[in-house]
Amino acid sequence: QVQLVESGGGLVQAGGSLRLSCAASGRTFSTYATGWFRQAPGTEREFVASIIWSGGYTYYADSVKGRFTISRDNAKNTVYLQMNSLKPDDTAVYYCVDRTLTDSGSYYYPNSWSSWGQGTQVTVSS
């Protein structure tokens, strides 16, 4: 069972930057991709970005393209989400997620990801 631990959240002013980290334990060869979702109060969980471990292909939600960058460090088994030009609308709990080769469905759906971290709060003030 994969365990994911997020860190790096906090309070930042609009226009500022934060870098989230997702450290994993228990990953196996069947891990296919890692990503980030976020959830603001009263809303559903929203896909943010993902990266495929083999090849490093990345995908982003339209709302964060050009501002957020997802990357991985294979040696550290860690995925990062660099968030620049933050806006108040980016305020949410950010969750790290893992997907295996046997998981199916669109990347955009939370049910397509089988492992979730506990989340880290990101608050952007105006």
Image (cartoon, rainbow, N blue to C red):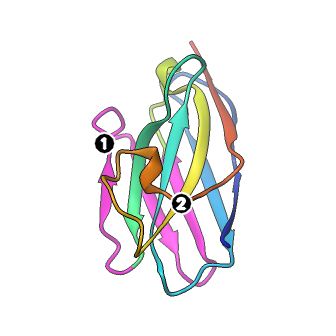
Residue type at tag 1 = Gly
- When the figure is inspected, residue 33 is found, relative to residue 111, above or below; the finding is below
- When the figure is inspected, residue 23 is found, relative to residue 19, above or below; the finding is below
Q: What element carries label 2?
A: loop
State the residue at coordinates (50%, 49%): 36
Foreground: 69 or 93? 93
Looking at the image, residue 3 sits to the left or right of residue 94; the answer is right
Mark 1 in CB contact with mark 2 (< 8 angstroms): no
Foreground: 67 or 46? 46
Q: What element carries label 1?
A: loop
User: Is residue 55 found inside the magenta-colored segment of the image?
Assistant: yes
Q: Which of marks 1 and 2 is in front?
A: 2
Looking at the image, residue 97 sits to the left or right of residue 32; the answer is right
State the residue at coordinates (41%, 42%): 47
Quarter of the rendering occupied by the C terminus: top right
Provide residue 117's location: percent of width, then percent of height: 67, 53
> Residue beneath label 1, please?
66
| Residue numbers of the magenta segment | 54-82
State the residue at coordinates (68%, 78%): 26
Provide residue 25's location: percent of width, then percent of height: 70, 75
Which disc number belongs to residue 114? 2
